[in-house]
């Protein structure tokens, strides 16, 4: 075996591992919805939820975040409350949360 073939094989292996890890580290839309639902369930039961399966980019705090928009509906003291959220695809953090009146 030639050294150039060995070095090429190692380089391809490292590149493949890097790309796999990068893809693995971002959340799917369903994983993002699960994170948001778990955060809301700490304060009571949820009646409904939704999430967009396509990503979008928003700018907050002078930074650009790529992630998913979604919503949660829950009952508090017999009243319906609706919230819309934006969750970051790479970290799983809820970046934006708005209560819909």
Image: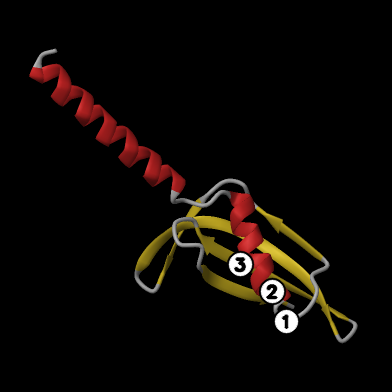
Q: Position of residue 85 (x, y in %)?
A: 61, 67
Q: Residue furthest front?
A: 1
Q: Quadrant of residue 18?
A: top left
Q: Position of residue 35 (x, y in %)?
A: 61, 64
Q: How many marks?
A: 3
The residue identified by callout 1 is 43
| Left or right for 40, reference 65 | right
Residue at mark 2 to residue at mark 3: CA–CA distance: 11 Å
Alpha carbon separation for disc pair 1 and 3: 16 Å
Tell me which numbered mark, 2 or 3, is placed earlier along the sequence: 2
Q: Look at mark 2 in the image and give the residue it sits on.
A: 40
Coordinates of residue 53 in the picture (x, y in percent)? 62, 47
Indicate the secondary structure of the residue bearing disc 1.
loop
Other-residue count near label 1 (Cα within 10 Å), few / some / many at <14 / 14–19 / ≥20? few
Q: Are marks 1 and 2 in contact (CB under 8 Å)?
A: yes
Residue highlighted by disc 3? 85
- The C terminus - image quarter: bottom right
């Amino acid at each position: 075996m030639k050294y150039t073939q060995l070095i090429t094989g190692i380089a391809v292996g490292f590149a493949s591992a890097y790309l796999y890890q990068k893809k693995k580290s971002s959340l799917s839309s369903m994983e993002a919805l699960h994170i948001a639902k778990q955060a809301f369930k700490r304060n009571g039961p949820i009646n409904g939820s939704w999430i967009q399966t396509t990503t979008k980019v928003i700018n907050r705090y002078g930074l650009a975040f790529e992630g998913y928009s979604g919503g949660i509906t829950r009952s508090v003291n017999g009243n319906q409350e609706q919230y819309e959220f934006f969750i970051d695809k790479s970290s799983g953090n809820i970046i934006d949360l708005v209560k819909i009146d």
